[in-house]
Each structure stands twice: as C-alpha cells, then as structure tokens.
Amino acid sequence: MKIINKFREIISNKHEIARNWKKQGKPVIGWTCTYTPEEIIHAAGALPVRITGDLEGTKYADAYLPTNMCSFAKSCMDVALRKKYDYLDGFIASNTCDNYGKMYDVWRYHVKTRFNHMINTPHKNTGSSREFFYIELKNFKDLLEKRLGKKISGEKLKSSIRVYNENRRLLRKTYELRKKNPPVITGRETLEIVLSSTFTSKEEHNLILKQLLDEIEERSDLPEEKVRLLVSGGEIDIVEPIKIIEECGANVVADDLCTGSRYFWNIVEESNDPLKALTDRYLDQIPCPFTYQYQERFRHVMDMAKTFDVEGVILFPIKFCDTYLFDSPQLTEELKNQGYPVLNLEWEHSMTGVAGLKTRIEAFLEMIRG
Amino acid sequence: MSEKKIENPLQTMRGFYRKHVEPFYEEAHRAKKEGKPVAWVASTTPIEILHAMDIIAVWPENYASVCAALQTSLKLCQAAERKGFSKDLCSYAKCVLGSIYEPVSLPAGGLPEPDFLIAATGACDTHLKWFQVVSRIYRKPLFLLDMPYNVTGVDGDNLEKTWIEHYKKQITEMIEFIEKQTGKEMDKNRLKKVVELSNKCNDLWTEIMNYRKETPCPMGAREAFSAILFMLSFAGTKRAIQFYEELRDEVKGRVKEGKGIIENEKYRLLWDNLPLWYNLGLFSYLRQMGAVVAVEAFSLVWAGKMDPSKPFESLARKHIPNYSNSSIDRKIEWFTWLSKEYKLNGLILAGNWGCRMMSIGEIDVRDAIQERLGIPSLVLDVDAADPRNSDMERVKANLRAFVEMLGKKK
C-alpha cells in the first residue's frame, strides 16, 4: 500500500520539510501542547510544527534537567540541543503541565530560539477563564503579527480554520476505518497519519488524506484480526509504544492520546468572530487532565471504547506525567465497571524496560483471549 | 563520636507540635462535629477570604508534613500506591490519600472530612489533581482558583493588568462558591478587619525574618519551617499575632545578646523547597559543622502587605508572583536578592522526587547564582515526605562535602 507510506515518509523527513519551507522564505513555528491554536500560526503564513522527541537519548538535556521528569519533554529538549530545531523562528509553549511549563525556561536559556512565547492557558473553561483566554489569544495573534511582520486578518483566520476543520473531518473519517474487524488500518499507521499532520502543511496533508480515503478500502495487505484495544495516555510522539503493543498480538483500534484522537476530535465553529470560536474550541476540547473538567476525558474514553468495540484498554501515560497518573485509578475503576479489562503501564521515552512491558502486555492479551 | 552541644534552641518553639499543631486539628474536628463548615485548601489559596467567611480551613499539605515528621508517612504513601497511584507522584498527595484509604492510627486523628475544597493553580498541577481525587471520594464540591501564570517572572508591582483583572474575578467566583456552600454572605467589613490582622501578622513575620539577616543568625530552618504555619494558615487571625509577637521578642532578644541559634556560626545557607520532614535532624547535622540555614526560599514568598481598600488586587500581587507560579527567572532574581540580604555562603537546592515544579530548573538556578555572585549551590535529589526517595547516607555525604568545600573557599 503505497499511499500509507507517505505519512511515514513525512515523519522521517520532518526536519527537511521544515527546512524546505524556510528556503521559500516562510517562517516555521514550533509548538508543544494541543492547547496551542495552530490556526493563528497558519493564518500568519507560517508552518506550525509540533515539537517531538526521538530515540537518540538525552545526554545533552541531562546536563540541565533532573531525572525525575517527563522523558518526552526531555527528549524534545535534547533534539533541540542537537540543533535539529535551529530552523525555528518561534517556540510556543503552554503552562498546561509542570513538566513542559517549567522546561520552557530551560529551553529559553539554552536553545535560544529566535523568539519564545508561552500562552497563558486557563485550567478551566468557565467564568472569567474564558475571557482571559480570549485576551491571551489576541495577544498571541498580535505577537505573531509583530514578530513575523504579517497582518492576520479575520478573513485569513477564517480561511485557516476551514483548512484545519477539513483536516479534522478527514481524520475522523480515517478513524472510521478502524471500526471494522479487522481494522482497515493499524494503530501504528493511525498514529503516523495523525502525527504527520503536525509536521507538514495541512493543505498537503488534506490531499494525501483524501487519496488515502479513496484507495485504502482496496488494500491487499489488510491487518489480521487480533484483540481490539484502546490506548489512553498523553503524548505518544514516536511509534514504538504502539508498535510493541501490536506486535504482542493486538490491534490498537482506538485511542485517547493528544497525539491521536484528542488532537483533532473537536471542530472549530465557523463563525464571524474567529478568535472567539478558537477560544471556545480549545477550551472546550476533550480535555487534558490538567483541567478542572477532567472527567470529560473519561466520557470520551468510554464513548470510544464502545463505538470502536474494544476488548480491553491500556492506560499508558509516560512516567512522571503527574496529571495522567492521578487520573489512572479512577479511569481504571470506571472502565472496569463497564466491563473492560484494563492494564496500567508507564513508558519511558528511551524505551528502556521494553522486555518487561512486553511480558505484561502479552499476559493481558492472553487474559482477554480467555 | 560525641557531639558538642552547639545548638541554642528557641523557647517559643518548644513543644510546637503539642502546643499549636495538635490543638488546631482538635479544634477542626470539634468544629466539624458542631456542624461548622470545614474546607480543605491548597497552597496559594488566599486564606484571608476564608477567615473572613468563618470557614475552618485545613491544609492537607501541612497534615502530610505532620505525618512525615511523626514517621507515619511511609505507610500512608504505600497505602495510596496500593490504590493504584504511581509511586513517583507527590509524596504529600500520596500521604493524604493514604490517610483516607487506610485511616489507621493517624496523627492528630486524621483530617476532618471536608464540606468543600479549594485548589489554586499557583503551586502546581498536582494540587488540582489530588483535590479532584479527594472531591470524588467524599462527593464534595471543589472550586478551582484559576491563576494567571507569571510567564515573565515579574514581581508583584509589575504584573500585567489582565492578570490582575482575571485574578480578581476568580476571587469573586470563589466567594460566590463559598457563599453557595454556606448560605452566608461575606461581610465586607469583616474582610477589612481580617486584612488588617493579616498585615500585622505579615509585619511581625517580616521583622522576624529581618532579624535572621544578622550574624550570628538567631533562628534556623528547623524553627522557621514550623513557625511559617501561622503565616500560611492563620494570617488574619489574632492567634497568629500572639504567636509571632512572642517569637519576635525572643529572636530580637537573641540579636541584642549576639546569641545565634548555634555557637560558632561559620556558614550561612539557603534551603530551597521543603525539608525532609522525616529527618529534621539533618539541620542539626549541618549545625554540627557550623552551618546554619539563615533563610528558606519559601519563608518570604508568603509575605506581602495588603491594601485594605483593594484586598483582591493585593491578593493578586501577593500570590501571582509566588515563584512556584512563575518563570524560573523569578527564582533566580529572588535567590540573588536573598543571597545578598542574608549574606549567604551557599545554597541547598532540595529537589522533590514527586515535584516537577521544585525539581526542574534547579541546575540553571545553581549556575546563575554561581555566575552572578560566586556563591555555590548543592542540588539534592530528595523527597519531602517519602523517605524511600532520599538516600540518607548519600545526602549526608553530599552535605558534608559541600560544607567542606565552603570551608576551603573561605
């Protein structure tokens, strides 16, 4: 299946894609959290890219960061210290977790991206928090206009919202392919599809997605029928964790990841006040656990488990990701009450301890098969 | 090895737990029985508002430190882990959750059940998460005070206007929430009085902290980490003023006599973050080497005078710049100032295994202070309440090597 490989290629070439974009004289802006309204960056004519880590270790970042922190964030920092992100014009972070929130400063001190900005993001979506976020987004727009020397008109913003919404709708359609048994695409392929959308222009990604949707049903290399799982967690920015699960004898057919369904699930209302529409969409999206309205994520997990007909759930936060780890016991209990077997695991970005993970996943799958 | 008697304990601090901590929890339990509203509050909650509304406010953080000091935190942490909470989470949170799940022979009879909870975003993510769990266990409502993050690390006089406005509205939302819980409106005159008392409390504490700038230092960390309880929990009440007046008098007397908290003071240190509550003897270990902790990073963070005519704005200026809610720039500026004011020889930056806020950025703080002032820092990998995350032999060896290094510098 040729088309499906395109997404993998985007991921392998992500730095090259960004550099080529720069060569055309257009800016590139890195972002870290799915509470960043990319549409504003897009409307400024810049390429928004998601900052992700890699498997090359963290010896540079270890010089500045402690052991007891999120290894995903640390890996991102290491990639930057290896100068792989030196094409960035701006680095945008959010105060949406203590890990990245505090690492933002360490990044500023040592990576020295041309400009840095933190979007002051409320932890709830009611009362004055909504007004506050609206003002913050306006400030963010003003900052980009100043830094990039481009006016972001209401019309431009509306048109960017349309492009992004199209991508979201196409990704929703792609997820439909996983409802079949066996699923038409694997969990690893799905992750590659979603991740790749954050490394290239949405216009291009939309084209490839449409082609995929036209052709994929006829693929000859359909995945085999295996145990159907949902994986829940935060940022899984590399395919290895999903790959390991699937190699143990499962199809990951649904997810609750911010590099998966939660990245695109909610649409922006196409209204006359685009900034207000973005405020609402980003604050009301299926939430990350750092928020007051955390239980809405549980509902998303339950809905997905049901509609994608899963046989079990793996809660797979990264080690030291406090907000997810605090949710895990309650989410486990609620899933079990609904009759879903649950496996709690923690992963580390370096993928150490894979043997131990495999053993536990295999035992879990065996239990499900009965 | 026989240790010389070199510590000069403060009379006011004698039996602090028995005299002040235990009775407070007894009172809270009694109030609960009498049907008075009890709230669980988190770090950076504006306590003055609660006092003005006659709410019995208990601090689960304080309770965790009590459990740790009484050597019961380990089994409580394990109880939380048995319920599925990761061992790498905040040990304060684990300790309090454990006390709910397995309430067996708890210090001070445990925490009284809350009628409602208030968390604020100013300290960390963990506070909200931990309180969400508690709120669900007891089926009691939780209010979140959504604070703007001090992105640029400015001080209280230089906050963005939009931050102050948002914060003020959050206070209004919080008051509305409490009024709904109690069915009683807040009395604005009462708040004015509380603010006046809070200012008096603040003046006394600041005065005490100023005496600690003297050489020899009249009061150390072991005393301060307990005494700060009144600033955190009782700012705005008469009991805080009574206690601080007594402490101030003693500390002032010490300065007059030229008598330090230890004999033969050689080195003055800063302690960042929390102490190892289960091993407060560590401060004596330092004292035996002639090292006194003259100031803690937290001790002055809670200080800040309020304008009785603008109480909400004052609270914004007091709490938003708390370094836990600020860019690391602020911590660097803050430590630079403290280092000069307290004439420090070294800084001890104690991380906390379950705390990202306290652990991330310590290396940059260390390097900045070294570069700016030539003052060295020691970064420690420890935990405030879970003794399994502090290798005591290594911690002691690190402290000894650090103090010896300071000796060579002198």
Image (cartoon, coloured by chain):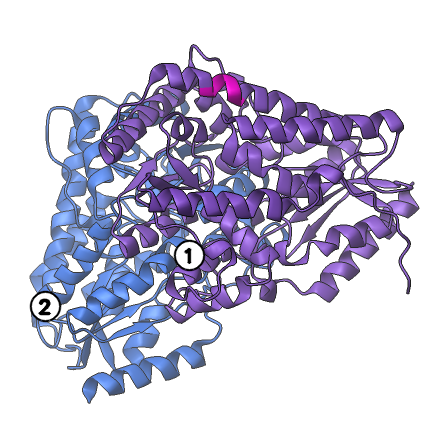
Chain colours: A blue, B purple
The residue at the point 19 percent across, 38 percent down is: A281
**Observer able to see residue B60:** yes
Residue drawn 45% across the image and 17% down it: B193
Letter of the chain that mark 1 sits on in the rendering: A
Quadrant of the rendered structure where residue A151 is?
top left
| Disc sitting over residue A321 in the figure | 1
- Relative placement, left or right, of B156 versus A63 is left
Residue, disc 2: A179
Q: Is residue A123 visible in the rendered structure shown here? A: no
Secondary structure under the numbered disc 1 in the rendered image: loop
Q: Badge 2: how crowded within 10 Å, few (<14), some, or many (20+)?
A: some
CA neighbours of label 1 inside 10 A, class few (<14), some (14 to 19), many (20+): many
Residue furthest to the top in view is B309
Amino acid at pointer 1 = Cys
Q: Give the range drawn in magenta.
A: B194-198
Q: Which chain letter matches label 2?
A: A
Q: Position of residue B172 (x, y in %)?
A: 30, 24
Closest to the observer: B71 or B124? B71
Q: Residue furthest bottom?
A: A370
Question: Is B174 displayed left or right of A178 in the figure?
Answer: right
Q: In which quarter of the image is residue A40?
A: top left
User: Is B196 part of what is drawn in magenta?
Assistant: yes
Q: Is A37 situated above or below B78?
A: above
Q: Tell which of B272 and B185 is nearer to you.
A: B185
Measure the alpha-carbon separation of dots 1 and 2.
30 Å
> Residue B307, how many percent across, how many down?
48, 13
The N terminus of chain B lies in quadrant: bottom right
What secondary structure is the stretch in magenta mostly built from? helix
Asked if badges 1 and 2 are on one and the same chain, I answer: yes
In the depicted view, which residue is nearer to us: B69 or B382?
Answer: B69
